Amino acid sequence: MAKSSLLKNLIIFIVVFLFIGSIFSLYNVSEKQEEQINIQKMIEQIEQEKVQKIEIEGSILHLTLNDDTKQKLKKENSESLSELLNNFNVDQQKIKKIAIEVKEESGFSYWMTNLLPFLIPFLFIAIFIWYMLRQVQGANTKAMGFGQSKARQVKPDGKDKTTFKNVAGVKEAKEELEEIVEFLKFPKKFTSLGAKIPKGVLLMGAPGTGKTLLAKAVAGEANVPFFTISGSEFVEMFVGVGASRVRDLFKKAKKQAPCIIFIDEIDAVGRQRGAGLGGSHDEREQTLNQILVEMDGFDPHANVIVMAATNRPDVLDPALLRPGRFDRRVILELPDINDRESILKVHSKQKPLVKEINLRQIAERTPGFSGADLANLFNEAAILTARRDKKKVSQAELIESIEKVMLGPERKSHILSKEEKKITAVHEAGHALVSHILPHSDPVHKVSIISRGRAAGYTMNLPETDKYMHAKSEYIDDLAVLLAGHTAEKLEFGEVTTGASNDLNRATQLARSLITQYGMSDNLAPRVYGKKEEMVFLGRDLHEQRNYSEKVAEEIDTEIDSMIRAAAKTAEKVINENNDKMDKIVKKLLKDETVEKDEFLELMGVKVEKVEEVEEKKEEKEGEVKKEVKED
């Protein structure tokens, strides 16, 4: 930045220097057109009758000879031309033959001759002083503007205007926010009944669920100005700057009322006070205090609504959440299958798709995906389509992009040896077989021994429907599925490898959660064991406060061991009873490396209905329904 500024200044000075030099050159050229002579030379030429014309311009004499040659000389200011010629006894008859003309010394020539030599240095100095003062003034302006708000104002009539039509899913959240739009559009409708306009709306939800998008949609629907700023932009190293920026932001917003102030990631400044060093003098806490004061000091008719977003509502200060500040709390959940299909339709509008695309199937394969994940999914599919030199995105690219988003890209350079390939096939076959046999586990959609991300292979289990509550039987079956790969290796090769390390870690965490958090232990009381506390300066839940004795801790470990052993025995039993199916899966994986859902069900001896048969049955049922309606 400093180099570019220095180069810019250097170019400016060079241009100014060349401009002034060109003026001097023009002046010098005009001087060189006339030959400089002395008085004796002029007298001699007059005596020889070579002079045709003399022009008197102050103390300068301009001579024009018979051959049109130009000459000039300088005489004394106090002496006239006639006196000069008389002093040299020039013949009067010869003087009468010469055309003598007197000119007033004025205009451009006068200024150029007399003032320019003094004016140019003065201009150089003046320009230099002006430029330095301008730089200092700019620095002062930046220093004085240090406490001004950095909020960006989004105009409601912009090209990228966002409305509720651009937000798929989150029906309950949109219904809640439609009231806010009504408040902004028709405030008298509510104030006439004595209702107060809500001062704050807190959007809470997992990352990527569309909190920022919803805030923009509210501003677009209400057609009001939208001030957006991140919570971290308030806090600086200088104490008081954050509070000053808060005051400036609210001052600007009141001038633009009705409008919306949106503070993204408000937990950056809204964390509970008194948790860190510095007490009330901490810069972050001063900023939070100013936000609280500004929100509580609003004029009831100011018609300015503060919206904030966070995915950590548990760390916010209670004063932010009390009535009169953030009156509304809108919770955004992860989208269900219908919402995911709607979101996929929104993102598909900007991308060329083949006619045979089935977004419902993609929605079924993406449980737990947020709106941002689905947008990324379509983007990855478009990139993959371009890489394959295709013109339209097909179902194959979308399905492959799901695996890339969930597990990472294929590691084609990661080539397994024959022995490692067989171990991986046995491991994944164990997961798939146990998952298929146990009644409470999720169905198998795909099994692969192609490396993706950090996994040498993977088994994709997807639920048939979105689940919001889970029974203990489901978790017990999940434990058996997690330990199935480890058990299959042990049964087939007599020893285990490090490939099951991630499975064992997940199984241990799941078993501990069942006992310490969900109250699913048969021997321990149904209570929560342990309390996690956030380390303020480390930023994550790294410390667990134990609220139980050493004896209970030993019982918890015993329960975890008992659960994991039981799950391993279940997996071993299923594998031993279905060795023939296990061998089929392993052979298919070693041959094709990937087994899709329909192929897997055929290996398991399940009759698979083709898509055409399903559609025919659906049409038959619809025809029967229509027939019954006509008869009625």
Image: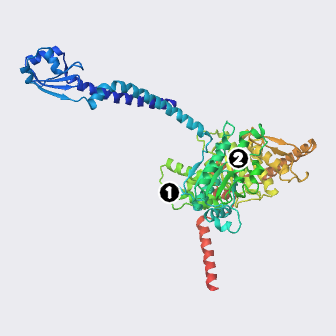
Which residue, given by chain and number where applicable, does mark 1 sit on? 352
Numbered disc in front, either 2 or 1: 2
Residue type of the residue flagged with mark 2: Gln
Q: Quadrant of residue 469?
A: bottom right
Q: What percent of the width, then of the height, locates residue 96?
A: 8, 24
Q: Give the mark count.
A: 2
Which residue, given by chain and number where applicable, does mark 2 sit on? 290
Q: What percent of the width, then of the height, locates residue 313?
A: 74, 51
426 or 624: which is nearer to us? Answer: 624
207 or 223: which is nearer to us? Answer: 223
Question: Which image quarter holds the C terminus?
Answer: bottom right
Q: At numbered mark 1, what does the secondary structure look like: helix, strand or loop? A: loop
Q: What percent of the width, then of the height, locates residue 19?
A: 34, 30
Disc 2 and disc 1: Cα gap in Å?
49 Å
Q: Residue at x 70, y 62 (%)?
A: 196
Q: At numbered mark 2, what does the secondary structure look like: helix, strand or loop? A: helix
Residue at the left extreme of this rendering: 93
